[in-house]
Amino acid sequence: RTMAGDAAKRAQRARSRASARYFPVVCAANAWYGVVRLVVRRSSATRWHVVGLAGSLAVQGLTFGGAVDAASGPSGSLGEYFFDVLVLSVVAEILGALWDRAWLLLVAIPAFAGYKAAKLVAAARSSSSSSSQMRAEQPEEAASSSSGKASGAEKKAKQKTLKAGRRR
């Protein structure tokens, strides 16, 4: 037995437990929506309710595997986003059986994606501006040190810094 084999077995058991937990909940939510909205409240059901159920089934089908993998994956993985989308679609479906506007909960998905994208763009701009600023400062430092015209105070400060570094 290797440690890698044990880890793979533990991950597989975690995925199996997650699947056994999530699948009945997803099926119950779909059955709830079908019975309540499309049978009991069929007088108020429209074509859009059927489209909503089909869309919800598609989202759940696409995210179920990733959500199950998140149970055994590292924290902060993409699987956690799949789990969040799966839970949001199930909650929207349960509430949507009773309230038409419950599907607006799903707006949180693209809103969060936009928020994360904006953070990435801001971080990229910040790192590019700081790196260009560092490049602009480096020639000045090189010019002052290569000119050899450092003042006496600057030389003493550099010597103190070097001595302090040697003592540690």
Image: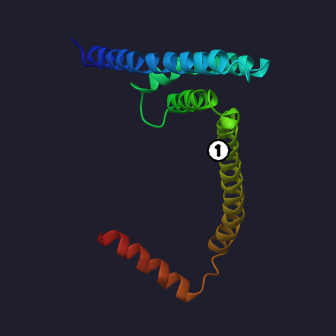
**Residue sticking out furthest to the right:** 47
Tell me, yes or no, if residue 62 can be seen here. no
The location of residue 139, given as percent across then percent down, is: 70, 65
Q: Amino acid at mark 1?
A: Lys
Left or right of 14 on screen, residue 147:
right
- Residue at (55%, 31%) from the top-left corner? 91
Q: Position of residue 101 (x, y in %)?
A: 70, 36
User: Is residue 20 at least partly visible in the picture?
Assistant: yes
Identify whether 20 is placed above or below 167: above
Viewer-proximal residue among 144 and 65: 65
Instruction: Say few, some or many: other residues with alpha carbon within 10 Å of mark 1 (under 14 / 14 to 19 / 20 or more).
Output: few
- In this picture, is 45 found above or below 127? above
Image quadrant in which you'd find residue 116: top right
- Depth check, front residue: 56 or 164: 56
Which residue is labeled 1 in the image? 116
Q: Locate residue 47, reporting x and y percent.
A: 78, 17
